[in-house]
Image (spheres, rainbow, N blue to C red):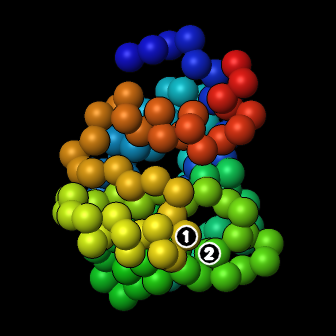
Amino acid sequence: MKDNIDLRGARILVIDDSKTIRRSAETLLNKAGCEVCVAGDGFEALGKIVSFKPDLVFVDIMMPRLDGYHTCALIKSNPTLRHTPVVMLSSKDGLFDRAKGRLVGAQLYLSKPFTGDELLEAVRLNLPQAGST
């Protein structure tokens, strides 16, 4: 794990119905200096996103109530949130899923299980201020 990357102050929202994924992502991102907010599904996330104002959103595709595609589409349709980068998370690594993610506005697609380095690299790639260290 590279310790020289400074992500301090980056606000990251992690939306996943898996408590394990939420907890491990939160731990990794906190260690990198990020401010992290977690949500168990799209509805819960929509309630938090406006007040938290994340710099980046990780969203699982397969979730109950409101899936990742719809959550991403709602974020991208909101004028104040539409420039927020969204990274889709999925255990399915199909071309169709990647294409559908792009259609709803996702910047990147991470396949589960992902490594800590992959997660942090996704943050670095999608946060302009983080890339210029």
Q: Are marks 2 and 1 in contact (CB under 8 Å)?
A: yes
Q: Which badge, 2 or 1, comes first in the chain's sequence?
A: 2
**Amino acid marked by disc 2:** Ile
Tag shown at residue 75:
2
Q: Which percent across, then down, holds residue 10?
A: 67, 40
Spatial CA span between label 2 and label 1: 9 Å
Name the residue that disc number 1 marks.
105
Number of marks in picture: 2
Is disc 1 surrounded by few (<14), some (14 to 19) or many (20+) residues within 10 Å? Answer: many
Front label number (2 vs 1): 1
Let me know if residue 18 appears in the view.
no
Circle 1 SS class = loop
Q: Is residue 24 visible?
A: yes
Residue at horizontal 72 percent and vertical 24 percent from the top: 132
Who is closer to the viewer here, 131 or 13?
A: 131
Q: Residue at x 71, y 38 (%)?
A: 128
Residue 50 location (% of width, % of height)? 72, 71
